[in-house]
Image (cartoon, helix red, strand yellow):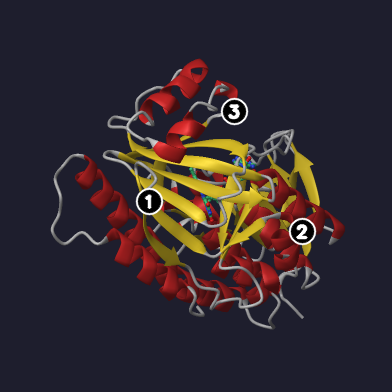
Amino acid sequence: MPTIRRVLIVGAGIGGLTAAIALRRNGINVEMVEQNPNWSVYGVGIIQPNNMLRALDCIGLAQQCAEDGAGFPGWRIHDKDGNHLMDAPSTCAAAPAYPENNGITRPRLQKILSDAALSAGATVSLGTTIDAIHDEGNAVRVTFPDGTSSSYDLVIGADGIYSKVRELLFGDKYRPLYIGQAVWRYNLPRLPSVTWGEMFFGPDSKVGLVPMAEKEMYMLLVSSEPGNPWMDRAQLADNMRQRLSAYTGPVAQLRERITDSAAVVYKPMETLLMPDPWYRGRTILIGDAAHAATPHLAQGAAMAIEDAVLLGELLGRDSGLQEVLDEFMRRRFERVRFVFDSCNQISTWEKQEWLGENDPNAKPGELLHSAILELMNDY
Ligand SMILES: Cc1cc2nc3c(=O)[nH]c(=O)nc-3n(C[C@H](O)[C@H](O)[C@H](O)COP(=O)(O)OP(=O)(O)OC[C@H]3O[C@@H](n4cnc5c(N)ncnc54)[C@H](O)[C@@H]3O)c2cc1C
């Protein structure tokens, strides 16, 4: 029997929902609070690498993701004009029954996770958060904005990169850091030729086309944006098109379809890595609240899901909480740090190259390939 019977999860996003499902599988009572009253996510896509599918398979959801998304075997590399340079196949070594990568829309992933969490018996209160956490040793008392309070055996902070739980636990010592690059994303009808992830390398940016369903794909553009400039939301389509002006070939043709600023999702890249441990007393952080890497390995949500599935598995064992939390950190910290460091390195090399300051030791393609292989290993 697990010693943890009642858990509060703050944040019902990718990590929080996955944790709710994993805990419910062990009979643990789960309540979630989610500050977004509409529980909505922005409408572009997410890449599910094979190790994420392995973790989702542990909670019975990989098959549904594969059915609702679009599998693809790796990345086709092109120059800015669309000339094919090489193929970089991915691997399905972690979960051989599933594709190497699966593109899926965020709303579809959110629906799969939220349906599973609710039907497993977790509850969610929308449009609310927590105000305070008091660790009382054998329980943790949480106060809510309406003045009520309740006691839990464990609180899980899954409230993303600007985590309030992190601030309540550790103060404002750990803050996201802007790293000088941004990602632009735009949904487009899928071209029949897009059967892999397609990457196009320009002089000061790179572009990706990612399948998300039979007839849907999204374009991602990574650009350097020194100083994290303010972007006028009404100008996002113009700004995205302008940054694509060096490309010819397929990217140039697609560029003309980027016309709706409201449909452009622009995200400055911010990073954060909390030192070990990510818990204090009976409250633990998972996902972006504890670690947010740049998207260069497409592993942010994968790491959040791996955190959640492992925590659920450990809490189902007949072990004391301290033992569970220590084992969790032992199995998560180095793996997450590896992702964090690899992404930062690739980002640094890219920024240097785009400034014309090539590092002779830069090998982003090799690092990406070896990092993805490494992440297929057990942890
Ligand atoms: C541009 C970009 C591209 C990416 N692409 C990929 C990709 O292809 N593959 C991949 O694996 N990862 C990708 N990621 C990373 C991925 O989106 C995140 O790592 C992942 O969403 C983290 O999940 P999470 O549950 O920790 O946080 P989130 O998904 O941010 O969820 C946090 C939830 O907590 C809620 N919340 C916040 N504050 C509070 C509060 N105080 N009280 C209550 N609720 C609160 C939020 O509303 C939200 O629902 C990308 C990230 C970016 C920025």
In the rendered image, the vertical position of residue 73 relative to residue 172, given as above or below = below
Is any atom of residue 238 visible in this view? yes
Query: Mark 2 near ligand 1 (CB under 8 Å)?
Result: no
Q: Is residue 267 left or right of residue 61?
A: left
Q: Residues within 10 Å of mark 2 (few under 14, many from 20)?
A: many
- How far is mark 1 from mark 2, CA to CA? 47 Å
| Separation of marks 1 and 3 at Cα, in angstroms | 26 Å
Judged from the image, the secondary structure of the residue bearing numbered disc 2 is: strand
- Residue under circle 2? 30
For label 1, the residue is: 78
Q: Which residue is rendered at x = 54% and y = 49% of the image?
A: 210
Q: Residue 268, can we see it?
A: no
Q: Nearer the viewer, mark 1 or mark 3?
A: 1
Find residue 202 and report its image quarter. top left
**Amino acid type of the residue that numbered disc 2 sits on in the rendered structure:** Val
Which mark identifies residue 263?
3
Residue drawn at point x = 52 percent, y = 16 percent: 234
For the point 51% across and 33% down, the residue is 254
User: Which badge, 1 or 2, comes first in the chain's sequence?
Assistant: 2
Residue 83 appears left or right of 32: left
Q: Nearer the viewer, mark 3 or mark 2?
A: 3
Numbered-mark total: 3
* Other-residue count near label 1 (Cα within 10 Å), few / some / many at <14 / 14–19 / ≥20: many
